[in-house]
Image: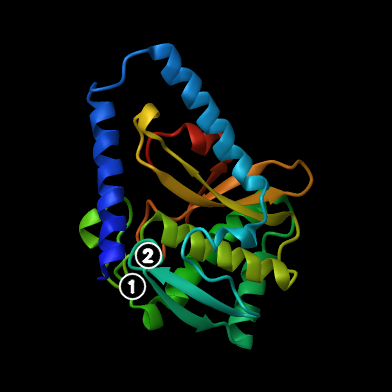
Amino acid sequence: MTQGYRAKVRGRASIHAMGGMMRTGKTFSGGGYVLLALGLVLSACASQANGDASGWYDGNGGLAPKANRIYVCHGFGCAYKTPVDFSASDLKRLQRILGKGSSSPAAERRAIAKAVAWQEKRVSAPVGSAKDVGGFDMHNAGVRGQMDCIDESTNTNSLLLVAQKNGYLKHHSASSPVARGFFLDGRYPHATATVREKRTGTVYAVDSWPLANGHPPRISELSVWMQRRAG
């Protein structure tokens, strides 16, 4: 583990520790200021989804897909990036999974969840992520094959971009991953991939971080995800 990465992990641990202090009542004084700041943070977080999904990578250590090759992030904060090429057979499988959701936006979101679970299983051998655990697990920081929310968001975003490029999404488009959580609202910082429903413009969180490798992610309206304290 490089010195820079150790510093990154220590920084995240400090953020989590401060979040814990906030939940136990050791908060800043001035409730009005806290609520105002919280509103501004939530508004700023929600607006992130309006950005280009491919713009996520530069600021989060990842690499955007190239053709049908994705770079799977793992080790926390994209410490490691393993290239995985989707074969013609892989693409047909992905197309079949997503094609089963063509009847409606809700059906397609269910199909997206199945596609994310499929990808996690598909890349587990080359990446070594078959035993990736879900949720808060800072003791696994820097461990190959283990993923934090930045890794998970990046990998799901890559899948969505590949699916979109190949025309497999009918009712949704890939929108930029977003983050929530801030010292003032007492929540751990957390990130998720998102999709935008084409007809309504509603953005949905596609959050695979809370669950272990190969489980379908939790999909919910972004406004609902933003209000959650965890998971």
Up the image or down, 138 lies above or below 122; here it is above
Q: Is residue 129 left or right of residue 50?
A: left
Secondary element at image label 2 = loop
Q: Residue at x 29, y 69 (%)?
A: 131
User: What is the quadrant of the N terminus in the image?
Assistant: bottom left
Residue 163: x %, y % from top left: 66, 69
How far apart in space, not on screen, are marks 2 and 1 (Cα)? 6 Å
Up the image or down, 83 lies above or below 47; here it is below
Please identify the quarter of the rendering in which residue 200 is found: top right
- Pick the front one: 99 or 154: 154
- Pick the front one: 156 or 3: 3
Give, as a three-letter code, the residue at label 2. Answer: Asn
**Residue highlighted by disc 2:** 213
Q: Residue at x 24, y 62 (%)?
A: 140
Q: Residue at x 27, y 70 (%)?
A: 2
**Residue highlighted by disc 1:** 130
